[in-house]
Structure formats: C-alpha cells, structure tokens
Amino acid sequence: MTVLTTKRLVLREPLARDLEPMFAIYSDPAAMRYWSTAPHEGPDVTKDLLDRRIAAWARAPVNFQITIDDSYIGNAGNFSGDEIGFMLNPKYWRQGILTEAMNAIIPHIFANTDHDQLTADADPLNAASCGLLRKLGFHETHRAQNTFCINGVWSDSVYFALPRPPNSG
C-alpha cells in the first residue's frame, strides 16, 4: 500500500468513504471556480469521479487523497499522462497544504513513472495555483485562449512544465 506522510498530512489511496467530503468540495462553486468542469450537481457525478480515481490507483498509485486526521480535504497528484493537478477544500486554502503535499508527491511520481517532465495547466486568473506551480519549480511554457467553457463562461489556460530532475528514478 502506497502512503506518503508529511508533517501534517497523510496522502493515501482513494476510498469509497471519501464520497461525501469529495462531493462537498466538488459541488462548492468557490472550490470549482477555476476547475475544468462545473460544480457537481449531485453525488452521482462525484461518485463517478471517485470510481475512476479508485480504478486509476489500482493501475498507478500517483494521484493521492489528501487527509488530515484521517479526514479527506482534497487531492493532488498525477492524474493523466504527465499532467498533475490538485483540489483542496477552501477551508484549508492559504495554509501551505498543497505545497506540503506536492513536495512529497512530485518525487514519488518521478520515482515511480518514466515521465520526462510533469505538466500542469491553470486559469491565468488563478493566482494561487499559478504561484504554487512556480514555487514548486514549474515554468510557464505557453498560453491559450478560450480553452474551457463552463456554464457559458470561457476561460483561458496557462501551461507549465517541470523537467525530471537528474537521478530521480
């Protein structure tokens, strides 16, 4: 079983019991403001996401559920190809949680995959996510306009990359 621990966090596999706290986050318009889908309208949408995460974990344990005191508060990791992403309950924003989680997850991803780099994209208006990616060592590669249309509102994207460090797996 793959579990990563940090000073405050346990990063673990997705579990069926995560459904309720995941739905609370993924149905929250504030949490979903810069996400690539609309807020989840019902738990069935979140259950589909959770089921896909459970299946993906069985193939490659690289996309983690973030927990504090055994309670799910978000997720972070490698979810598709070489792309990373993260989501956090707004109650925990601006506390360094994602920095702490990603500083444990990124070395794990490089040690357990053959990715030459990790990539990420964010809405350029999402200063927090763009700042976190830069803090983690990602550099901007390019931008694109009108990449997502959620509920009739178009968003742009800024793309980032982090090359594989030497001797990382």
Image: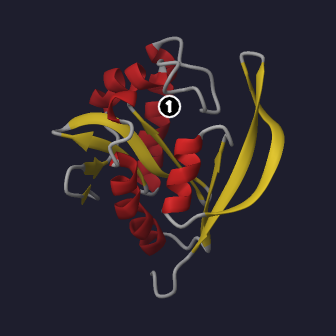
Mark 1 falls on what kind of element?
Answer: helix
Q: Nearer the viewer, residue 84 or 155?
A: 155
Q: Mark 1 belongs to which amino acid?
A: Leu
Q: Quadrant of residue 164?
A: bottom right
Determine whether, in the image, residue 66 is placed left or right of residue 47.
Answer: left
Which quarter shows the C terminus?
A: bottom left
Provide residue 124's location: percent of width, then percent of height: 68, 43
Q: How is the image coloured?
A: secondary structure
Q: Quadrant of residue 123?
A: top right
Residue 79 shows in this picture: no
Q: Residue furthest top?
A: 41
The residue at 33%/28% (across/down) is 91
The residue at 34%/62% (across/down) is 104
Provide residue 115's location: percent of width, then percent of height: 58, 70
Which residue is label 1 attached to?
49
Q: Residue furthest bottom?
A: 167
The residue at 21%/41% (across/down) is 68
Q: Nearer the viewer, residue 128 or 109?
A: 128
Determine whether, in the image, residue 73 is placed left or right of residue 106.
Answer: left
Q: Nearer the viewer, residue 160 or 13?
A: 160
Which quarter shows the N terminus?
A: bottom left
Q: Residues within 10 Å of mark 1 (few under 14, many from 20)?
A: some
Residue 95 shows in this picture: yes
Provide residue 23's location: percent of width, then percent of height: 41, 21
- In the image, residue 113 sits, relative to residue 148, either above or below, namely below
Q: Residue furthest left?
A: 69
- Marks counted in the figure total 1
Provide residue 94's location: percent of width, then percent of height: 38, 40
Determine whether, in the image, residue 137 is placed left or right of residue 22.
Answer: right
- In the image, residue 33 sits, relative to residue 4, either above or below, namely above
Q: Quadrant of residue 157?
A: top right
